[in-house]
Structures are given as C-alpha cells and as structure tokens.
Amino acid sequence: MRGRDEETGEFLDISRSQNRRAALDVLALGEKLVALTPAQLARLPVPEDLLPHIAEAKRITAHIAHKRQLAFLAKHMRREDDAVLDALRDALDVNSDSSRREVAMLHRVEDWRERLMKDGDKALGALLDEYPQADRQQLRTLVRNAQAERAKNKPPRAFREIYQTLRVLMLPAALGLEGVHADQDEQDQPADTDTDTGGNAED
C-alpha cells in the first residue's frame, strides 16, 4: 500500500518489485471478477466505472485480446482507492466461502432426490425427520410422478420439480438464510401452474 508524505500529501515512491507485485495482485483480482457470473458480480461492491471493462473482458474470448483487455481492466482498477480494492477482496472471500457451501448443499439436494426416487416413502420419512416443514403430500406426489416418467421414458418434469422443491427447502437453512429463497436468477424456470395432469402417474 502506498503511503503519503505528511507535509506535501504526495504519494511516496515504492520499489519496482513492490510495484510489480501490486500490479500482479490487481491483475489477479481482475481475473477473478471477470470469471464471476452477473449474479455473483451484483453481490460485490464493484465500482460502476469498472463494470463496462469487466463486461468487455467477458465478451472477448481470443487469448491475446482477452489478456490485453484484462490488463486494461487492471489499469483502471489501480486507479481506485486501496479501500475499494480491499473491499472487493473481502467480498470475494466471503462469496467464495458461500459458493463452496452452496455447491456442497446442491450435491446434497441431488443425493436426497435420488434417495427419494429409490426408496420412496422410507426416504421421505427420513427427510421429514430432518426437515419437518417439508410438504409430505407434495413430495410424495412428485416422486410417484417422477418414477412414472422414468419408467415410461417421458420428459423429467416432475424429476426437475423435486430438485427445485428440495433446493428451496434445504439451501436457505444451509446458508443461514432461513426464510429467504435462493436467488431467482440462479433457479430454473418455475414449473407450470396449470392443472393438466396428463403426463402424471395415476394411482
């Protein structure tokens, strides 16, 4: 971090090696920002003037041109206050930890879906022991419909609905966001609400 002369207020010079390390650090930070999805970027305190440069780096895929755009982004980032860049680093660390937990939970959702498909009511009972707020009848119906879809080689509509239902049930609690749904932009399109059950199993 550059210091200031107490009398003149001017930035103090730093060594060439320090300057290079700082430049590479900012470049690495820029690469992390470019790799994020729009939803992830929206959660970070990214200055408005950097967003067009990030978007352009995302758009360019040619290797040399992409590296050039990253360097251009880093140049603009170095004009920001140290506090701004530190805030971005801190937010990325938090976001990274949250993402790891979310990925682990999504794997757990997939595991529960397969358990429900395989063991039916037995797995449903175990799920309700852990998540008593779950809708037993809704899940039982979805599982039966999904099993029928699989047996008849039909599109897995109910199978996808099980995933979304479990995701809404399990993910907020795992991330400490009880009562808050997962981000809409990261969810699949909501299931149809029509009453046509032509593709569903009948007991």
Image (cartoon, helix red, strand yellow):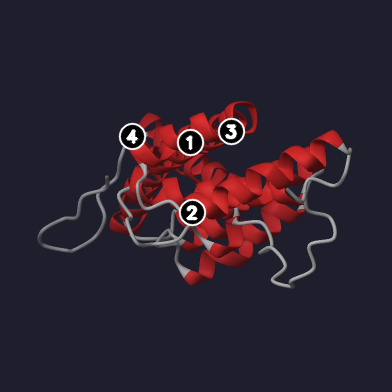
**At which x and y percent is residue 58?**
69, 52
Q: Nearer the viewer, residue 194 or 18?
A: 194
Measure how far apart labels 3 and 1 are at the Cα level: 54 Å
Answer with mark 3 or mark 4, whichever residue precedes in sequence: 4
Q: Which amino acid does label 2 sit on?
A: Val
Q: Which mark is residue 15?
A: 4
Instruction: Tell which of 196 and 1 is nearer to you.
Output: 196
Q: Which of 105 and 148 is in front in this view?
A: 148
Q: Where is residue 154 in the image (x, y as percent from the top left)?
A: 87, 44
Q: What element carries label 2?
A: helix
Q: Which of marks 3 and 1 is in front?
A: 3
Q: Check the image and report above or below for 189 versus 121.
A: below
Please state if 82 lies on the left or on the right of 122 as rendered: left
Residue at the location (16% across, 55% down)? 5
Distance CA(mark 1)–CA(mark 4): 14 Å
Q: Which residue lies furthest to the front in this view?
A: 203
Instruction: Tell me residue 85's x, y (percent).
Output: 36, 53
Tag 1 and tag 4, C-beta contact below 8 Å = no
- The residue located at (45%, 67%) in the rendering is 47
User: Residues at badges 2 and 3 in contact (C-beta under 8 Å)?
Assistant: no
Q: Mark 3 points at which residue?
A: 120
- Give the residue displayed 34% in from the left and 62% down from the top: 179
Spatial CA distance of label 2 from label 3 is 20 Å
Give the quadrant of the N terminus: top left
Q: What is the secondary structure assignment of the residue under circle 4?
A: loop
Q: Which amino acid lies under the numbered mark 4 shown in the image of this protein?
A: Ser
Give the number of the disc on residue 179. Answer: none
The residue carrying mark 1 is 24
Residue placed under numbered mark 2 in the picture: 168
Q: Which mark lies nearer to you, 2 or 4? A: 2
